Structures are given as structure tokens and as C-alpha cells.
Image (tube, coloured by chain):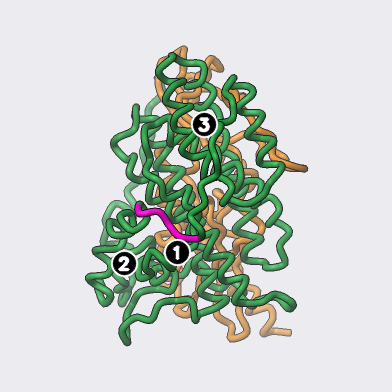
Amino acid sequence: MVPAVLDQRRVERARAVAATVTDPELPMLTLHDLGVLREVALDEDGGVVVAITPTYSGCPAMATMRDDLLHRLQAAGFAEARVRVALEPAWTTDWITPEGRAALAEAGISPPGPAPRREGPVALSLSPTRRAVRCPRCGADDVALTSEFGSTACKAMYRCRDCLEPFDHLKEI
Amino acid sequence: MPEIHTHEADEHDSAYAGLLVNDAHWAFGTDFEDPLAGVDTTVPEGIDAHELATYCLRLGDDALILSQRLSEWCSRAPDLEEDIALANVALDLLGQARLLLARAAAADPSLVPALPEGSPVPPEDALAFFRDDREFRNACLVELPNGDFAETVGRILVFATYRLSLFQRLTSHPDAVLRAVAAKGVKELTYHRDFAGRWFLTLARGSDESRRRLEAGLARTWAYRHELGEDDEAELVLEQVLATSGIAAPDVRPISTGGRHTEHLSRLLAEMQVVARQHPMGVW
């Protein structure tokens, strides 16, 4: 089946192109490393369809991600490429790849720990979230949460009590 | 100290580099693409499309109006961290609103206000910007003025507690789109409820003044909370926060507006809608 093999190569090539697109807010991460890029496939007409999952419902970067993907794919010869939104399952920080976590830490952003497991009603938590966070600059574990909300929807703000620098932590969802 | 990395120069450094040809869009609204692009919006069998649409509209309106209210805090919160936190909560709610209004429009297009021929306004924005106050289905609780920070904290606590409880149940709704919005929303609302709950506790245990303001603000919210629906689980959570904070449930009678909105909604909508309504054909 020669056509099937050709299709497979096309998908692989498109996937390789899509995987190079970076997040507009976290440019050290590719959409693949962030876990936003969910699928690259062909539709019935042989057009490339890329599925992406929003990190947060109101994430304003989705339009840029879509445009960047189309731009890169069109430049690589996939003129008819489409981007579709995959809402289910919801994005989780567990999808960030080990390479992505390393890139975050390298850029001074503390990578997320394991996402909370949800079984039964979500428990109320009236004390600050406990996380095993280390300062991405000096490595100290004596850190304090400044705010659960940061410069983008996906980050919390911390400061290091050792080197005194503030830093972002990608929060677990 | 290690070197601080920024990033290699890329196409995001120029606002023009990433533009695709022919991508003129309506000049207002939340974003420039279909939030349900490629999502199967077929209404499942056994579900009434109009009922599903009006239900999504109600949930979307609650989120939209509270988002607009909370945005008024931008640059006015007690400190920078809380300013950012409130803006983030508002952004999450705006995202939920957008998906829910888009879902409502896809399920029953007859709900979407008619606009001039060739108008570039997407359906969810037509619903947000071109309906009058009487057509909004939100609970009155979300349209009330913010009051002070303590009152806003109490209102987010009540709203997020009810909505989180509801969204957990909606994760098994037969409609796949509503189910997905709910599953996503559960994660966001968990942060909102915890944020408000922690501040509630802090203000309750703070000074006499912070406690006085918290109690006064909660009394104004409390009278409207029954509009969010009967929900024993949500009530239990609120009781837990009140007990931990040493605050008694306000002794207020429920206010019933008989399905009408308060006067505050029309002022909020005037500010939110005025520019969009002047330019239903506006493209950039």
C-alpha cells in the first residue's frame, strides 16, 4: 500500500514541523513540550489537521498558537493545514515533557509537581498550597509562596528566602 | 548567580511577523478565532437543543458578568498580587463564558441576536455585546457592585463554591461540550474557591475593621445566593469556611427580584457593550 506509506510520511513530516512551534508566553517551550499539541493527522481529503488543547479556558495565547502553527505548516508546504480545538480531556501539567521541565528550570521558572488526583468532591484548602518547590536560581528549598496567581494564568509567584529572588512556578492543574 | 536566560529572537518579537494574509477580524470581543473550531457540536439524542442552549447561556452569563465586575478591580486592588489574582480569576471566567456562549449559539442559533448582513461579529460576541439587560440570564449576585475587597472576597467565595459543586456534577453531562467545559472549569474554580476562602479566613482573623467589613459585605451577597440553586454540598463547604473563620451565617432574608435584574446590570452592560454596539461592522 504505497499511498498509506506516503500518507504516514506526510503526517510524520507535518508533526515534526508542528513540534518546532513554541509557546508565545513561554518561548523556551515548544507546544509539544507543553503538551498542548495533541495530535497531527490527515482528514478525509488528505489535509493536515493539528489538534491543540487550551491550557486554561481563557488562555489568550490560543489564537497566536493557531496562527504560528498554520504559518509554520504553510511555509513547509502544507497549504491546506487546519487547526482544531480538542477540549476533552482537559489539559494537565502532567503532559509537560521532561525536556519541557528542564527548559523551564533553565529559564528560571520552577516546573510543576504532579497534578492533584481528583476523586470525589474537590477538598477545600484554607491554608497555602504545600509544594516541594526549589528556587530555580540557587536551588534552595527555603521558598515562600507570594501569590497563587502570576504573570499568566498558569503560574504562581514565589520568592526564595535564601537568594531573595522572586520566581514563577508553573502550578499543577 | 547563574546567568538569566531570556530567549532567542523569534517571530513573536515582531507583532507583524506572525500575521497571516486576509486575517481581518471583527475589532472587538475576546479573541479572533472560533473557540469550538473542529469540535463536534451535535446535540446528543434525547437532549432538547433549546433547553441546552439556554442552560449554557445562563452559565455563560454568570461567568461573563462576574468577569466584567472583577475586571473593575484591575489597578485598584489592595496590592499587586491581589490585583493580578483578581484579573486571573476574571480571565478564567471570561474563558468559560466564551466557550459556553459559543456552545449555546451552536446548539440553538435562534438565540443569537440578528446583526446587519455581512457583520463580522462571531456568535458568542453577538450574544455578549448585542443583547439587552432583560435578555441576560445571570444570577443577580454576579451583577452587584464590587463593594470593598472584603465584599468581593465573600462574593467570589460564594460564587466559586456553588459553581465548583455544579461543575463537578456537570462533568457527567450527556453533552460532550458542556462536559468538557465543566471538567476544565473544575480545575480553575478550585483555585478561585481556595483563593477566596484563604482571604476570607485572613480577613476574619485580621483586625476588628477587616472583620466588620467582611461581615457587612457577606450580608449583601448572602441575600442573593439562593439564585445559584439548591445545593447541599456547596452549603456544607460554606458552613465549613464560616465555622473555621468564626463568622456566623448572615441573618438576612433572601431577596427575590422575581426573575428581573437589579439596576446595576444595565450600567455594567452599558460600559461593556457601548463601543462594540457602535461598530457592528468594525474590522481591523
- Chain of residue at mark 3: A
Q: How many marks?
A: 3
**Dot 3 and dot 1 residues touching (CB under 8 Å):** no
Q: Residues within 10 Å of mark 3 (few under 14, many from 20)?
A: many
Q: Could you say where residue A80 lies in the image, as x and y percent from the top left?
A: 48, 80
Q: Closer to the observer: label 3 or label 1?
A: 1
For the residue marked with disc 3, what is the amino acid?
Ser
Residue denoted by label 1: B136
According to the picture, the residue beneath numbered tag 2 turns out to be B19
Q: Nearer the viewer, residue A19 or A113?
A: A113
Q: Which chain is green?
A: B
Q: Amino acid at mark 2?
A: Leu
Neighbours of disc 1 within 10 Å: few (<14), some (14-19), many (20+): many
Identify the image quadrant of residue B20.
bottom left
- Please give the range of residues in magenta: B259-263
- Find numbered disc 2 in the image and state the secondary structure of the residue it sits on: loop
Q: Main secondary structure of the magenta part?
A: loop
- What residue lies at 54% left-to-right and 70% top-to-bottom? B104
Q: What's the chain of the residue with tag 2? A: B
| Letter of the chain in orange | A
Chain that bears disc 1: B
Can you identify the residue that label 3 sits on?
Answer: A110
Q: Residue at x 60, y 52 (%)?
A: B184
